[in-house]
Amino acid sequence: MKRILKLNVNGEDLEILVEGHKTLLEVLREDLGLTGTKRGCDLGTCGACTVLVDGRPWLSCLTLAVAVEKKKITTIEGLAQNGKLHPLQNAFIEKGAIQCGFCTPGMILTAKAFLEENPHPSEEEVKRAISGNLCRCTGYVKIVEAILSASGRESRGE
Amino acid sequence: MSEFNVVGKREPMLDAWEKATGKAKYTDDLSLPGMLFGKILRSPLPHAKILKVDLTEALKVPGVKDAISGRDIPKRKYGIVPKAKDEYALAIEKVRYIGDEVAAVVATSPEAAEEAISRIKVEYEELPAVFDPLEAMKPGAPIIHEEVPDNVSATIRKEFGNVAKAFKDSDFIFEDHFETQPVNHCPMEPQAALAMVDHFGKVTLWSSTQIPFFLRRNLATTLDLPESKVRIIKPKVGGGFGQKIDLYAKDFCAAFFAMRTGRPVKFVYDREEVFTCTRQRHPMYIYLKTGVKKDGTILAQQFRVIADGGAYNSTAPLMITLACFFIMLPYRIENLLFEGYHVYTNKPVGGAMRGHGIPQVRFAVETQLDIIAEKIGIDPLELRLKNAFQAGEPHPAKLLVQSCGFSETLKKAAEAIGWREKRGKLPFGRGVGLAGASFPSGVSNMSHISSGAIVKIERDGSVTLLTGAADIGQGAETVISQIVAEELGVRIEDIRITAADTEITPLDPGTFGSGVTLRAGNAARMAARAAKEKLLEAIAEKMEVSPGELEMKNRRIFLRENPDRGFSFEEAIKIYQYSDRPMPIIGRGSYFPPAKEPTTLLHEDGNFSPAYSFMTQAAEVEVDPKTGRVRVLKMVTAHDCGKAINPMLVEGQLEGSVVGGMGQALYENIIMEKGQVLNPNFLDYGIPTAMEIPSIESIEVETNDPEGPFGAKESGEGTQLSPAPAIVNAIYDAIGVRFKTLPVTPDKVLEALEKRER
């Protein structure tokens, strides 16, 4: 049965009519047109669908949309502010951390939440933080580099 | 100081910004008004006759708009290799593996399509099935395709030199058996297709494909339409690694239902379908016999390779040919006999995967080289250097190798891993190993390998580039743009590229066989040159000099001898325009790799590729004798890519490929029981995560190939040939146990260690 759902997505309050069984991933992609969030496995095993819920990384394919009502949801589309990219986005672009790009949104959002908790991580800590986000193209090397470089940049307030 | 301005630069990928902001559109991100959603019913049996498919109940589900079974489709077979077509878009008379497509539906929602699929009634008559290629080759085995009664659907037998005599002349002969496992490509983006049909009956298909022009041909075939009625557009593709070469039922069904219903139709595979019903790396049985002299010279090699093809051919004849051709390099082997067989079984289908038939055989060769080195008392590095092929050397099978940095990759990789200090000298549980390989930069025979490009110099000083090349995340569009920018003396941001749309862009074979940079790069460079010549002619006339005295660089056209005399790019375009020359300034390029003596190459000798890349992987590992777990501490990948057009992208290719190779050495394996895949998800299959990655050092060896654009050759695919043997050789150095079966899982290590203690 459909119901009215109040969501806050990327700073915007929305009211949408959805089936109760819809996942957050489905609602984002199909109802809100936010296709930056990717569907990679539908089992919570690849991390491509990661979004932030109240700042925490969340697997949107395993989350019912009704379960995150009134929480703040951030998708990759909401990361750049006033046309200015987030330092992680810049770092991913410049360091060659993006190849096919399918894991990128989830990877960047996971890294964002992680760096907010741990602004000066070691390489091992970065690897652990993104170990739930799979990538088949890069071998993770440049992704780790990008996250480390963004952490440095953030600490310098750039 | 580099002679180039754009080539050789670490340019970020042109579409990285779109991908970092979530704006990049992949096939499943596209929607059209009134779009229907499709779902496919698949066989639960490995081998059975289809007696009856009843769609009645499915059609009653609210929202369902259409349903079909194999009996409703044109009876047209398809396949990548024309002579090996053996597959219908939906199974017609029988199913040949668990997952074979039986029926399909479209509905106004994915849920309704799912519900409808569960209501289709199929009556099967189960047939005996066969799951092992050795069993399938035996007389009396179940026949999987009636037209191939022995189940051997592709073979190659190639011999040169005098193998029997060479074995007689050998001081030592080594014989070993090796086995490799099925591996899934695991692109992060599952396969998807979206189709619509226009007023004139033309089908447009957006598809997650690596080869749009081949897909156009196969789709037209299966729909029974002329090619001109089919348009393929490749949106962003989330990785392919060979798995997005084939046409799949989702492509056919999207198009066929769009034709039947008049509405746009989308099909998206779920992850289980990607694991079980697309393609996988062929598991192989490899018998290898090698004869050597006391000093380590390889005199002869003999191979018997049996590839488990699963239920259909896909690339079978090409795969088994490549397996043969790339054991003819990177070592000098004067006498060789290769017998290869592609065998049908009632299992998921083998197809092209990064390295395509070669990593399996390379694993055997490189593992055995270490066995040989130990037996005759030569350092494995020295043994390889001794037999390493060199540029310009006559090749016994007439391959034409114009550039070859193999020896250099061996030396550099060995140095970087600390070979001399570490090999045989580390404590128990630690070891180093290395392995070499060679790979083509596209093929020059037996295929449709022309690539075209169009370059237009626009009035505002920008450049429009049309290429058929299919970027699937490797950065082809960026690299080709760099080549054009360099040729025209402009910045990369001046280039606007449109790629991989069969209606707009010129023909290109697509992303396979590592030919994109060389093939599409050469075509684009030719097109840029043709446009440039037109512009230079106008400026030469204006300056009263000959075009040969002019140079185009830094967005200026000037006299080489007196750089102050000249015009800006914009001024030059104006001069061209006002000299009453026809606009637009357009150049066309069409590249066909040189093939002096076109042969089938299966029996005759001849050249195979316009250029060959060479590489060495070296590994340092740590084996925990308590748990059997192998940890790769460091991987070195030294790669002769001719010339790195974009070193950052080359590194990215090498790093990703090495980690994939590591996964195949240690973790990855599609586990099957009676044709049923038991681990069709990431959790149970287990590709490497960031936690497992070693430190990786990439070394680019540049040899400037005369055929490649600005000297460039392949990178990234050949890299996946040798990580597994390098790791397995390092494991031997660490614990003294030799593994001949992949992957080397902890249980195998523990079992081997226990056996050794006893």
Image (cartoon, helix red, strand yellow):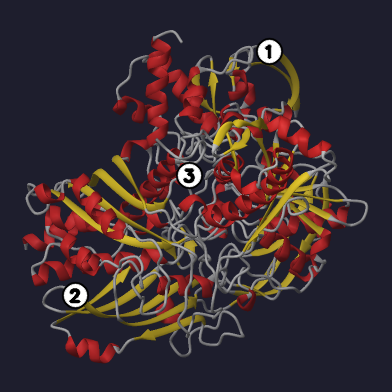
Q: Nearer the viewer, residue B251 or B519?
A: B519
Residue on which the image places disc 3:
B645
- Look at label 2 and name its amino acid: Thr
Q: Secondary structure at mark 1?
A: strand
Picture residue at 25% right of the left edge, 56% below the top? B410
Q: Position of residue B738 (x, y in %)?
A: 18, 63
Q: Earlier in the sequence, mark 2 or mark 3?
A: 2
> In the image, are marks 1 and 3 on the same chain?
no
Q: Position of residue A22 (x, y in %)?
A: 67, 31
Residue A12: image tag? 1
Picture residue at 56% right of the left edge, 46% below the top? B476
Instruction: Give the alpha-carbon distance from disc 2 to disc 3, as whole Å.
Output: 36 Å
Q: Which quadrant of the structure image shows residue B416? A: top left
Q: Position of residue B337 (x, y in %)?
A: 35, 83
Q: From this viewpoint, is residue A22 visible?
A: no
Q: Is residue A72 above or below residue B173?
A: above
Q: Chain of mark 2?
A: B
- Name the front one of labels 1 and 3: 3
Residue B297: image tag? 2
Q: Chain of mark 3?
A: B
> In the image, are marks 2 and 3 on the same chain?
yes
Q: Quadrant of the N terminus of chain B?
A: top left
